Image: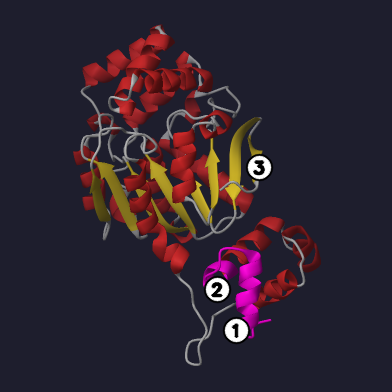
Amino acid sequence: MEGKSAIRFLPIGDRRVAYEIRGDGPPLVAPAWWVSHLELDWRSADFRRFWEGVADGYTLIRYDRLGVGMSDRLVQDSDLTLDSEVATLRMLFDELELEGVSLVGGSSGSCVAVAFAAEFPERVERLVLYGSYCDGAELTPPGVASAILAAVRAHWGLGARILSDIFLGGGDAAEQERFARLQRESATAETAADVLDLVYRLDVRKCLPLVNRPTTVVHRRDDRAVPYRCGREVAAAIPGATFIPLSGSAHFPWHGDVDSVVRACREALAPNELVALRASASEPVLLSDREREILALVARGLGDREIAEQLVLSPHTVHRHVANIRRKLGRTSRTAAVAEAARLGLV
């Protein structure tokens, strides 16, 4: 994950959503959580450790929702709906020409991942949900939710500290202060409260039975922000879903026992990254004609853009084909894939 990284901007009307593409391999998309900041989040060693572990061998795609982080800060009432969240994710898929993608949805991002997978199952390969829930009204008693929202709107410094205590599950004072500062730098008090209100309003109960992609639900037993029972309910309602309970109280996976969450997520993604159709006399590697054509050009040393120009394709399409070739050959780099293809007589 220390390789190439680029922050780009997706036009949505006259506004822009910031997204980052980091690493190399099959695409792994993380729908936006409550508040985030592409640049500042990655400065956190714990945040990097989590995503570098989960997304090793993948192209990680993250984005800041409208109103927060590096995205345009203007938020409209029409943005604060589940339909709008799904539409943003769909536009990102269209922009990058993504198909058959694994989604890692955390917290409120899990609701967006579920709704997207229910509506566009052909574009999703598998789901990994962490700290998930299906009905935001179940997260906290109505009076408590109203009090938290009022505190955030009235005094962002106090509100940020309250949320740090909830989300970090008893982290030390320095951790809580760092996260409180990150929240304030990522969004205004009004936007933070508006988006948090959306978190409490999200409801994907009707979407859960419609999800027909392989799904793994990971949840910490003492999560203080999203109760454990919420994750169990999500897993129970998605046909064939696997539920992985973990110890801990921190809501964010990059706090507390990070390694256990990484292991659970990697196990869920393993079928996607480890499928290697190795050649043998009875079981040849199955590459499409287009993939063989692109593989031959990769073997000649051409990059994605050069291949795209030669075949009249977009660089994103070429990149996706190369990722699929590497996956099928069971290799994590272009050079290793070419060497394996040569060994198998494919080039």
User: Looking at the picture, which amino acid does disc 2 mark?
Assistant: Leu
User: Looking at the picture, which amino acid does disc 3 mark?
Assistant: Ala
- The image's mark for residue 329 is 2
CA separation, marks 3 and 1? Answer: 34 Å
Q: Pinpoint residue 28: horizontal percent, then vertical percent.
A: 50, 52
CA separation, marks 3 and 2? Answer: 27 Å
Q: Pinpoint residue 13: horizontal percent, then vertical percent.
A: 64, 33
Say left or right for 268 vs 14.
Answer: left
Report whether residue 32 is seen: no
Say left or right for 156 vs 249.
Answer: right
Q: Is residue 304 positioned above or below 151 on the image?
A: below
**Which residue shows up at 41% across the image and 42% down it?**
112
Specify which label sits upstream in the sequence, 2 or 1: 2
Cβ atoms at labels 2 and 1 below 8 Å apart: yes
**Which residue shows up at 66% across the image and 39% down it?**
8
Name the quadrant of the C terminus. bottom right
Segment tinted magenta in the rendering: 325-347
- Magenta part mainly helix, strand or loop? helix
Say which element carries label 2: helix
CA separation, marks 2 and 1? Answer: 10 Å
Report whether residue 48 is seen: yes
Instruction: Decide: few, some or many residues near mark 2? Use Cα within 10 Å; few <14, some 14-19, many ≥20.
Output: many
**Which residue shows up at 25% across the image and 52% down it?**
243
Label 1: which residue? 344
